[in-house]
């Protein structure tokens, strides 16, 4: 035992532990780090390729209901087509994907031309994240920064939690870390969109801090209110599925089904700039006792 | 230059960990079971630790842990620290008490992954979020069991790699 404690391997263990503890403290306090950016430079291109290949394979395997002859005909036709288009295929695929992204971006931009956006692909989903967070293939070099809202044409998806040089991490609305000031466009009632693991496992959100006399009902549409300057106003979030009584006080909450499938989204837009951004970043979880005013 | 095999083997391990990280991060590649997907780099590092001396085992544990830290968006260093110490311990344990065979690999995987996912749940979930028991039931335990399935496969892969590139010094 004494020999082991004096050995070089034990010293290496102690040094490693000290260095990693220092790294943990540094990244916990300073946020993004050089190491993470370097890892991003290495992993991002490979992740993009792996994701694209997987998507193509999944699409290929989804050929339900075709007979053998039909499949043979399809293969022959595709081989002919492939030989003709071989030299243009890579460019075509890239242009097509870019076109899809730009169409979505244009559609969203027309709805809210004041917001400045960049499009991105989801390149990774970490299995360790219980709240379906994901990585996108753009980072600070593309103008993305921490706190930028992430949307699709169906509505709000989440927020950039970490921005590295070429990649960013997104906390989606299913995360307990994400709170969004929201409003019902029909009833003009405000609340705070959040989630917990119980609802996240069903893909649902919770609109908290409604009064006990709330008029919200099934089918009401929920959007961002814009309060706090964290998210632009009028981004679609979801539709009320039911209204329940709070477990802890007399207030009520609404179960909201998001418009977007948060756990399987593939293409997103990051809003890097919008009017009113950061005007008031003091919005916090209001707590049950002062729910109505601060929930806005 | 005296032990070229060891250098090539080390590079192969790092490449393996990188590829496994890509695979586990790729959406849609592994079918979700009860909504969870496997974490491949952790059992790989535990198995590699069985085949290497303690310092190198720790190094591969740290690399695997850094990949997990990077993917998880948490602070860098937590998984690296836990995996580094775990792999150091696994290597010493195997050198002192255990034979290297598929059964001990599975036993090491059960223990190492249990400690890793347990500490992940404790430090990343229990102290931060609500309903930790529910999270353990619907996320951490299914993920643990799903990941364990890959231990024998990764053992065979790395055992074959270690035997095809043996160290000249016998380590």
Image: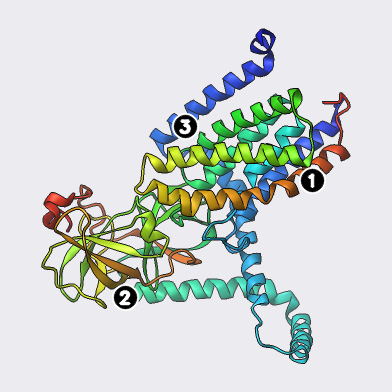
The residue tagged with tag 1: helix, strand or loop? helix
Report the residue at 44% width, 38% height from top. B122
Q: Residues within 10 Å of mark 3 (few under 14, many from 20)?
A: many
Position of residue A203 measured from the top left corner of the image (x, y, whole percent): 40, 65
* Chain ID, mark 1: B
Disc 1 target residue: B156
- How many neighbours does mark 1 have within 10 angstroms: few (below 14), some (14-19), or many (20 or more)? some
Kindly report the distance in space between the C-alpha atoms of the residues bearing marks 3 and 1.
Answer: 33 Å
Q: Disc 2 or 3, which lies upstream in sequence?
A: 3
Q: Which residue is mark 3?
A: A24
Q: Answer above or below: position of A84 versus A233.
A: below
Q: Are marks 2 and 3 on the same chain?
A: yes
Residue A221: x and y, percent? 26, 74
* For residue A227, side relative to residue B84 (left or right): left
The label nearer to you, 2 versus 1, is 1
SS type, badge 2: helix
Q: Is residue A47 left or right of residue A185?
A: right
Residue A109, position as x, y percentages in the image:
36, 72
Q: How is the image coloured?
A: rainbow
Query: Same subunit under labels 2 and 1?
Result: no
Whether labels 3 and 1 share one chain: no
Q: Quadrant for residue B115, please give it.
A: top right
What number is the disc on residue A111? 2
Image coords of residue B170 (percent x, y)? 86, 26
**Chain to which mark 3 belongs:** A
How many tags in the picture?
A: 3
User: What is the C-alpha distance between the residues marked 2 and 1?
Assistant: 55 Å
Q: Residue at coordinates 13% horizontally, 63% vertically from top-left? A: A211
Residue A232 visible in image: yes
Between the C-alphas of marks 2 and 3, the distance is 42 Å
Q: Nearer the viewer, residue A106 or B4?
A: B4
**Nearer to us in this view, B76 or A44:** B76
């Amino acid at each position: 035992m004494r020999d082991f404690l004096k050995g070089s391997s034990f010293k290496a263990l102690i040094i490693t532990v000290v260095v990693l503890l220092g790294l943990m403290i540094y990244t916990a306090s300073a946020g993004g780090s050089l190491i993470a950016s370097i890892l991003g430079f290495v992993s991002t291109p490979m992740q993009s390729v792996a994701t694209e290949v997987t998507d193509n394979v999944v699409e290929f395997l989804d050929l339900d209901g075709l007979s053998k002859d039909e499949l043979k005909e399809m293969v022959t036709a595709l081989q002919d087509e492939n030989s003709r288009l071989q030299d243009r295929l890579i460019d075509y695929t890239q242009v097509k994907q870019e076109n899809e992204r730009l169409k979505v971006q244009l559609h969203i931009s027309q709805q809210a031309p004041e917001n400045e956006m960049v499009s991105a692909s989801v390149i990774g989903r970490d299995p360790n994240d219980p709240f379906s967070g994901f990585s996108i293939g753009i980072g600070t070099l593309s103008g993305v920064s921490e706190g930028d809202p992430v949307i699709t044409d169906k509505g709000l998806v989440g927020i950039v939690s970490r921005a590295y040089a070429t990649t960013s991490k997104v906390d989606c609305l299913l995360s307990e870390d994400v709170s969004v000031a929201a409003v019902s466009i029909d009833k003009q009632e405000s609340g705070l969109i959040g989630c917990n693991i119980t609802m996240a496992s069903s893909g649902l959100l919770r609109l908290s801090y409604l009064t006990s006399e709330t008029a919200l009902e099934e089918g009401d549409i929920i959007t961002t209110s814009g309060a706090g300057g964290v998210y632009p106003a009028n981004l679609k979030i979801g539709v009320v599925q039911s209204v329940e009584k709070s477990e802890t006080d007399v207030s009520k909450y609404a179960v909201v089904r998001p418009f977007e499938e948060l756990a399987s989204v593939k293409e997103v837009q990051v809003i890097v700039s919008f009017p009113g951004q950061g005007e008031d970043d003091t919005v916090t979880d209001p707590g049950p006792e002062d729910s109505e005013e601060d929930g806005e | 230059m005296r032990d070229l095999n060891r250098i090539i083997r080390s590079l192969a391990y790092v490449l393996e960990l990188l590829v496994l990280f890509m695979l586990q991060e790729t959406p849609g590649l592994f079918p979700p079971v009860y909504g969870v997907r496997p974490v491949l780099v952790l059992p790989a590092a535990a198995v590699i630790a069985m085949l290497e001396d303690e310092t190198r085992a720790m190094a591969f544990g740290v690399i695997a842990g850094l990949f997990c830290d990077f993917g998880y968006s948490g602070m860098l260093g937590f998984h690296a620290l836990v995996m580094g110490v775990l792999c150091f311990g696994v290597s010493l344990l195997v050198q002192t008490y255990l034979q290297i065979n598929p059964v001990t690999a599975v036993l090491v995987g059960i223990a190492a992954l249990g400690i890793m996912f347990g500490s992940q749940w404790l430090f990343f979930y229990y102290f931060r979020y609500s309903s930790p028991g529910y999270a353990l039931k619907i996320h951490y335990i299914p993920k643990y069991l799903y990941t364990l399935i890959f231990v024998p496969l990764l053992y065979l892969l790395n055992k074959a790699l270690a035997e095809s590139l043996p160290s000249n010094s016998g380590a």
